[in-house]
Image (cartoon, rainbow, N blue to C red):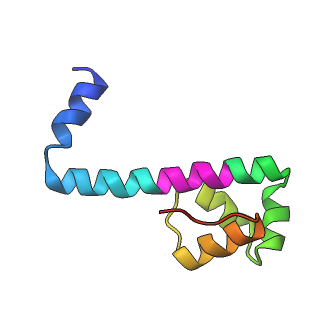
Amino acid sequence: MKIDSLLNEELKNPEFAKKFQIESKKLSAALALYDAREEAGLTQTELAEQANTTQATISRIEQGDNISIDKLSSIANALGKKIKN
């Protein structure tokens, strides 16, 4: 079974679909943060200093770990960005 077929089958399960959507949003946030940081020419440490957080926090977010909206907003602000829905 191909991965697309398997995923489409699993997405029929409401519990799986909900968890998949949550993980997709975390991945999107992680990629957006990485792209914005790279575009700004900042290291994780430099961004952490500007966002008043730690390099480890930036790293965890870029790896897709969970984060509060307040923390993500603070980091976006340090990059001169806004969070979109």
- Up-down: is 74 above or below 83? below
Seen from the viewer's position, the closer of residues 63 and 40 is 40
Image quadrant for the N terminus?
Answer: top left
- Up-down: is 68 above or below 76? below
Left or right of 71? Residue 49 is: right
Seen from the viewer's position, the closer of residues 28 and 56 is 28
Left or right of 70? Residue 57 is: right
Residue 29 highlighted magenta (yes or no)? yes
Tell me the residue at 82%/72% (across/down). 50
Q: Position of residue 73 (x, y in %)?
A: 62, 73
- Up-down: is 80 above or below 17? below
How many numbered callouts? Answer: 0
- Quadrant in the rendering for residue 29: bottom right
Tell me the residue at 58%/65% (across/down). 83
Left or right of 64? Residue 36 is: right
- Quadrant in the rendering for residue 72: bottom right
Residue 61 highlighted magenta (yes or no)? no
Residue at the farthest top position: 1
Tell me the residue at 61%/51% (across/down). 32
- Up-down: is 48 above or below 21? below
> Magenta-highlighted stretch: main secondary structure?
helix
Which residues make up the magenta segment? 26-34
Tell me the residue at 68%/63% (across/down). 58
Q: Position of residue 35 (x, y in %)?
A: 69, 47
